[in-house]
Amino acid sequence: MAGRAVQKRRTPDPSTFIGRGKALELRDFAASVGAGLLVVDDALSPTQRSNLEKTTGLMVWDRAFTIMRIFERRAITAEAKLQVELARLKYEIPSLKGLGHQMSRLGGGIGTRGPGETEFERHRRKLERRVKYIEKSLQGVRKRRDLHRRRRAKDGVRLVSLVGYTNGGKSTLLRSLTRDESIRAEDRLFSTLDTQTRRVDCPSAGPFLMSDTVGFIKKLPPELVAAFRSTLEEASSADLLLVVADASSQTPLENFEVVLETLRDIGADEIPRFVVLNKIDRVSEELLFVAAGFESRGEDVIRVSALTKEGLPELVRRICEKLDESR
Ligand SMILES: Nc1nc2c(ncn2[C@@H]2O[C@H](COP(=O)(O)OP(=O)(O)OP(=O)(O)O)[C@@H](O)[C@H]2O)c(=O)[nH]1
Ligand SMILES: [Mg+2]
């Protein structure tokens, strides 16, 4: 990153969001350090984005687009790829509308439709057909998943879902519990976009399934939430949720709020849950404080380190106990 700027305004500038003066300042700064991309940590309208690009001469990404680009790079399975593409199309089509408006104005005047507009209309229709196609394929995936879910319920297999803010350690936890090295866990945002399910054995009772899925983040673009809905909804059919919280985060309770909001959104906030306070190997005194914060909200906290495996036997014991209780 070449630099960072903060703009304080009472209201965003309708035409450039940050204001023309600030935009020119950024243009000069970018030129002096050789930067080519401006990332804005908020939502821009298509007009603001294009005006900012014109004024600064930089490529401009807003928060939604940036998160989408990260998702795009992380998507591995066909389903995740389709979901990201759908989100991107839904994000781009409205901005094309703005463009079409400009084009028709340019070509208009004599009462004929400009050649630009027809070209644009064709392009937009093509994108809209693609949206329809993707939505249909995703529906198929959802149906198959429903079928699995019903079969699982019929066979009495219990499901525990890992949820939580991105980078909290969900995948690491699943990897440690199952000793499955093929599960990817990395120090970056949205390392997991797909659902992965593994079997975990209870010491005394039968096994249960544990599934890991996409992490949550604040101000996730609505296009992405919509596209990843079926993946997020996996958690709503669980018998027990493990909300993984990073004890070493600067804002564990704020992140937890975001997670709760998402859980409410997908109808999973009434499912029994534990807060798994992870990464305790990275904190000392503060831990008491963070744990107390969760406990004062009535949460059942279990402290672990997915990395050093401290607390994991206790976690499994508590999970099995809970599943047994609710049987
Ligand atoms: N020190 C420490 N690091 C951990 C622990 N658990 C996970 N990490 C690290 O935290 C980072 C994120 O871990 P992941 O397991 O990928 O996190 P995640 O919740 O699956 O993240 P997303 O898939 O992006 O939602 C990795 O660099 C892990 O090595 C832990 O208990 N202690
Ligand atoms: Mg993960």
Image (cartoon, rainbow, N blue to C red):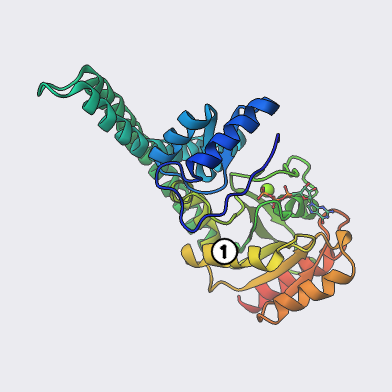
- The image shows residue 291 at horizontal and vertical percentages of 77, 74
Q: Residue at x 90, y 67 (%)?
A: 284
- Secondary element type, mark 1: loop
Quick one: 243 or 166, which is closer to the camera? 166
Q: Is residue 51 left or right of residue 271?
A: left
- Residue that protrudes farthest toward the top in the picture: 115
Which quadrant would residue 49 be assigned to in this image? top left
Q: Examine the rendering and report whether any part of residue 80 can be seen.
A: no
- The image shows residue 46 at horizontal and vertical percentages of 40, 39
Q: Is residue 186 left or right of residue 131?
A: right
Q: Residues within 10 Å of mark 1 (few under 14, many from 20)?
A: many
Q: Total marks drawn?
A: 1
Q: Residue at x 15, y 22 (%)?
A: 113
In the rendered image of this protein, does residue 327 appear above or below residue 127? below
> Mark 1 sits on what residue?
238
Q: Is residue 49 left or right of residue 115?
A: right
Q: Residue at x 42, y 40 (%)?
A: 48
| Image quarter hosting the C terminus | bottom right
Q: Is mark 1 within 8 Å of ligand 1?
A: no
- The image shows residue 45 at horizontal and vertical percentages of 41, 43
- Residue that protrudes farthest toward the left in the picture: 111
Q: Examine the rendering and report whether any part of residue 70 can be seen.
A: yes
Q: Residue at x 53, y 74 (%)?
A: 270
Quick one: 221 or 12, which is closer to the camera? 12
Q: Is residue 134 left or right of residue 167?
A: left
Q: Amino acid at mark 1?
A: Ala
Which quadrant would residue 289 be assigned to in this image? bottom right
- The image shows residue 14 at horizontal and vertical percentages of 40, 47
In the rendered image of this protein, does residue 89 appear above or below residue 120? below
| Image quarter hosting the N terminus | top right
